[in-house]
């Protein structure tokens, strides 16, 4: 347990002799001690300079010790409160339940008893604080884990795993309610040349900025994800192939006009283009599963690449059902 001078103790008692003894005993153990002569003063001091432990007399003028304990515990349930009482109290359990106090010391008290009770309560608080810190670290670790499970580290977009989960869910929903579900797959043209010419850090910047373009160009309800490497996807619930084509073209045009940042260059200098393929469910009898929709969009992307890149190709059967 840390040395006493790490702790601030507030004593509240309307009897000067009790205050003097407690102050002398606890100060000798290097505790920083503040004193209050009534309940109202104790509450004021506690609000201005929160203590690590409070010793409060049960009977005091203006605001009694039980009310002080109750109010202090309402503000900070973790601060130990020890109530001092002048007689054997048969309502110990009721006092603890009513005020949230942690301990009760009978008067007249001995120094060893007070010192032992104070050290015990402070040690318990140290344990409680350590548990709180451990729980907070665990919560943050869980948040980081959740981000790793759902998000791509380089771009901040949803990752492949999360995309597949959402694709499965949205496909079931589209089938159940006879809604359209469109998938657009994007591939950055000649991305290897970007890495070879400008370096991989610059390539990472391009991936991140392209992801930002996709997010800005889409709706909040669209699921934008990094599919892997230089491939990205936009899953568009309740969207026809025509509207999916418009989104893909908008992203293509913005990308072509955009200047991307290199790793160390102060000005954006990198130019890229992007090809995309679009497909929509339902698509006659050909799309029966989520992976069929992915294959149809991939095939459309392949055709866009084969036609010269920097273009959008829509699966023809998707266009047949677009209206």
Image (cartoon, rainbow, N blue to C red):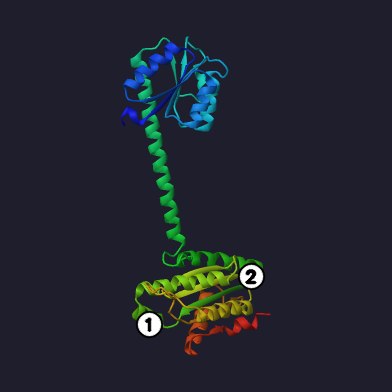
Label ID, residue 193: 1
Residue 135 screen position, x and y as percent: 42, 43
The residue lying toward the viewer, choosing from 240 and 212, is 212
Q: Secondary structure at mark 2?
A: loop
When the figure is inspected, residue 19 is found, relative to residue 150, above or below; the finding is: above
Q: Is residue 111 left or right of residue 54?
A: left
Which residue is located at x 63 percent, y 73 percent?
A: 239
Q: Judge the density around disc 2: few (<14), some (14-19), many (≥20) Cα neighbours within 10 Å.
A: some
Q: Judge the density around disc 1: few (<14), some (14-19), many (≥20) Cα neighbours within 10 Å.
A: few
Which residue is located at x 52 percent, y 81 percent?
A: 257
Farthest right residue? Answer: 323
Residue 131 seen in this snapshot: yes
State the count of labels: 2
Q: CA distance from mark 2 to mark 1?
A: 37 Å
When the figure is inspected, residue 123 is found, relative to residue 296, above or below; the finding is: above
The residue lying toward the viewer, choosing from 17 and 93, is 17
Residue 55 screen position, x and y as percent: 44, 21
Numbered disc in front, either 2 or 1? 1
Farthest bottom residue? Answer: 307
Instruction: Tell me the quarter of the image containing the C terminus.
Output: bottom right
Which residue is located at x 48 percent, y 64 percent?
A: 162
When the figure is inspected, residue 183 is found, relative to residue 29, above or below; the finding is: below
Q: Earlier in the sequence, mark 2 or mark 1?
A: 1
Q: Secondary structure at mark 1?
A: helix
Q: Is residue 148 left or right of residue 91?
A: left
Which residue is located at x 43 percent, y 51 percent?
A: 142
Quadrant assignment, res 25: top left
Instruction: Tell me the quarter of the image containing the N terminus.
Output: top left
Residue at mark 2: 238
Residue 256 screen position, x and y as percent: 51, 82
């Amino acid at each position: 347990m840390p040395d006493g001078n790490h702790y601030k103790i507030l004593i509240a008692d309307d009897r000067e002799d009790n205050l003097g003894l407690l102050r002398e005993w606890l100060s000798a153990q290097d505790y920083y001690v503040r004193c209050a002569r009534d309940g109202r003063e104790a509450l004021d001091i506690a609000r201005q300079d929160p203590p690590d432990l409070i010793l409060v007399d049960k009977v005091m003028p203006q605001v009694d010790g039980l009310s002080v304990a109750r109010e202090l515990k309402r503000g900070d349930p973790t601060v130990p409160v020890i109530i001092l009482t002048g007689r054997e109290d048969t309502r110990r359990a009721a006092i603890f339940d009513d005020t949230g106090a942690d301990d009760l010391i009978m008067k007249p008290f001995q120094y060893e008893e007070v010192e032992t009770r104070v050290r015990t309560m402070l040690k318990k608080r140290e344990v409680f604080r350590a548990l709180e810190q451990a729980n907070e670290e665990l919560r943050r670790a869980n948040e980081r884990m959740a981000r790793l499970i759902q998000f791509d580290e380089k771009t901040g977009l949803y990752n492949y795993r999360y995309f597949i989960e959402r694709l499965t869910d949205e496909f079931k929903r589209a089938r159940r309610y006879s809604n359209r579900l469109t998938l657009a797959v994007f591939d950055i043209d000649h991305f290897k040349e970007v890495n070879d010419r400008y370096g991989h850090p610059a390539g990472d910047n391009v991936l991140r900025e392209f992801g930002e373009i996709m997010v800005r160009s889409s709706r909040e309800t669209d699921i934008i994800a990094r599919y892997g490497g230089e491939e990205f996807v936009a899953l568009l619930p309740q969207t026809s192939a025509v509207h999916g084509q418009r989104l893909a073209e908008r992203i293509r045009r913005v990308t072509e006009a955009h200047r991307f940042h290199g790793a160390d260059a102060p000005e954006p200098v990198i130019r890229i283009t992007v090809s995309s393929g679009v497909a929509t469910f339902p698509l006659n009898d050909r799309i029966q599963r989520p992976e069929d929709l992915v294959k149809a969009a991939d095939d459309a992307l392949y055709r866009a690449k084969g036609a010269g890149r920097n273009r959008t190709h829509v699966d023809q059967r998707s266009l047949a059902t677009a209206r």
